[in-house]
């Protein structure tokens, strides 16, 4: 078994029945795995400060640069934004004033987009010609 696989198993599982208090009792190291370093690599952030005592991080240039970059990250919920854009597009088009028809239309469009996330002429031909 790879060490990353073992590491992922130690990651806490959060179920609907687990109470927030149980999670809040955990320490930071309970949420960190070997894969956590990928975060720094994916964002091209310095990570040398991780080898320095945390009490000295406030004066470490690598830490300050990484902290600044992370503080300015824009967190996006793509799924929610796509849903909002979908509703906005179809309500502004005023295709129907009937709420049930609008809901049905949104459901059909949403399912269609799931089945065909890239809708270009080429993608349509590849899908329907096969």
Image (tube, grey):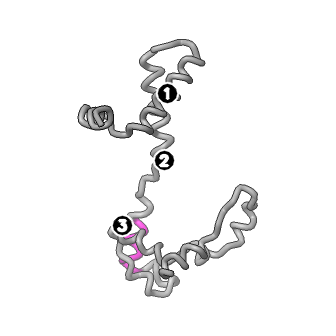
Name the residue furthest left.
Answer: 122
Q: Is 20 on the left or on the right of 98, as rendered?
A: right
Q: Secondary structure at mark 3?
A: helix
Q: In the image, residue 117 lies at what x, y percent? A: 38, 39
Mark 2, Cα crowd under 10 Å, few <14 / some 14-19 / many 20+, is few
Query: In the image, which disc is placed on residue 66?
Result: none
Q: Nearer the viewer, residue 4 or 46?
A: 4
Q: CA distance from mark 2 to mark 3?
A: 19 Å
Residue at the spot of label 3: 42
Give the mark toward the camera: 1 or 2.
1
Q: CA distance from mark 1 to mark 3?
A: 36 Å
Quadrant location of the C terminus?
top left
- Which of disc 3 and disc 1 is earlier in sequence? 3
Q: Is residue 67 magenta?
A: yes
Q: Is residue 51 magenta?
A: no
Q: Which residues are magenta?
A: 60-68
Q: Is 126 on the left or on the right of 87, as rendered?
A: left
Whether residues under marks 1 and 2 lie with C-beta atoms below 8 angstroms apart, the answer is: no
Q: Nearer the viewer, residue 75 or 96?
A: 96
Residue at the spot of label 1: 108
């Amino acid at each position: 078994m790879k060490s990353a696989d073992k590491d992922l198993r130690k990651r806490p599982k959060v179920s609907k029945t687990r109470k927030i208090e149980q999670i809040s009792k955990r320490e930071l190291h309970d949420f960190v795995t070997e894969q956590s370093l990928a975060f720094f690599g994916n964002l091209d952030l310095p990570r040398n400060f991780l080898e320095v005592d945390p009490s000295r991080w406030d004066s470490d240039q690598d830490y300050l640069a990484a902290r600044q970059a992370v503080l300015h990250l824009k967190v996006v919920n793509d799924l929610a934004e796509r849903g909002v854009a979908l509703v906005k597009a179809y309500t502004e088009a005023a295709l129907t004033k009937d709420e049930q028809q609008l809901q049905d239309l949104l459901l059909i469009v949403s399912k269609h987009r799931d089945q065909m996330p890239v809708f270009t002429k080429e993608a349509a031909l590849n899908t329907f010609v096969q």
